[in-house]
Image: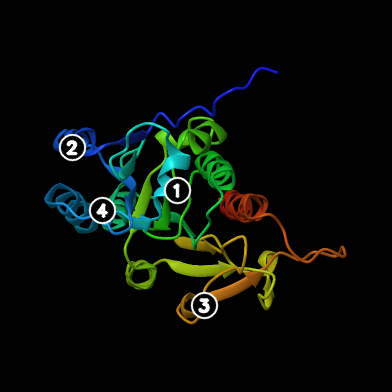
Amino acid sequence: MEHYKKKEDSNMVFGIHPVEEVIKAGKELEKVFVQSGLRSPQISDIVKHAREHGVPVQFVPIEKLNRLTRKNHQGIVVFVCPISYQTIENIIPMVYDEGRMPFVVILDRVTDVRNFGAIARTCYAAGVDAIVIPSRGSALINGDAMKTSAGALSLINVCRVENIKDTIDFLKASGLKVIAFSEKGKQAIWQADLTGPVAIMMGSEEDGISEAYLKRVDNHLVIPMPGDIDSLNVSVATGIVTFEVVRQRLSNG
């Protein structure tokens, strides 16, 4: 029987010197994995750089790194981001300056890369101005995500933020209605006015939207489901919601 090696992610870089070179080249890091207990000035500098730029750092057993690559990783593996993150504080004023109403999607801890890629594809098709994700607990933007997005991740604005609460407050202060969607919502999506500046929030595949965020949003809506299943895949639900916004805006002229 012929055995095939798992292909390494093309955005993965390992070893102290290669990682230092990536940072010197100004590449954005997506995630950093460091061997637990490993200490060195170079590793400390890399970790410091990552944290200063809001990049998640995980200290993991060596076995985790060995699963990522069988080559000499020297206790550190990083993933280079294939896209350039944008700043939501810059995007919203720019959209207003263009005479348009901002349309934002906030993803709370959506971790499946294919779901994330599919959501990006849908959002780009629906004319969403930006996707907001947390710096920790979000899907890794890798080759699978890029492929599933059919190129949309290279075209749509993605904003990685340290604090979703602060982003919600900023969006509300900027005139957007922030609306959460889940099966626990009290009002049907079709009954709400989504024609103005809006940010829709979708929750994680496991446990939905964090309670702390639900307390801050302007409204909490539900997609009515007459069948026996009371929840949808997050990418499917995002598609329904984003195109309901499109439908209402087109109907409103």
Using the image, determine if residue 193 lies above or below residue 36.
below
- Left or right, 151 with respect to 162, comes to right
- Residue 165: image quadrant is bottom left
Residue under label 4: 90
Q: CA distance from mark 4 to mark 1?
A: 41 Å
Q: Nearer the viewer, residue 54 or 94?
A: 54
Residue under label 1: 63
Secondary structure beneath label 3: helix
Residue under label 3: 214
- Left or right, 101 with respect to 187, comes to left
First in sequence: mark 3 vs mark 2: 2
Using the image, determine if residue 72 lies above or below residue 102.
above
- Left or right, 56 with respect to 217, comes to left
Q: CA distance from mark 1 to mark 3?
A: 38 Å
Secondary structure beneath label 2: loop
First in sequence: mark 4 vs mark 2: 2
Which residue type does callout 1 highlight? Glu
What is the number of the mark on residue 116? Answer: none
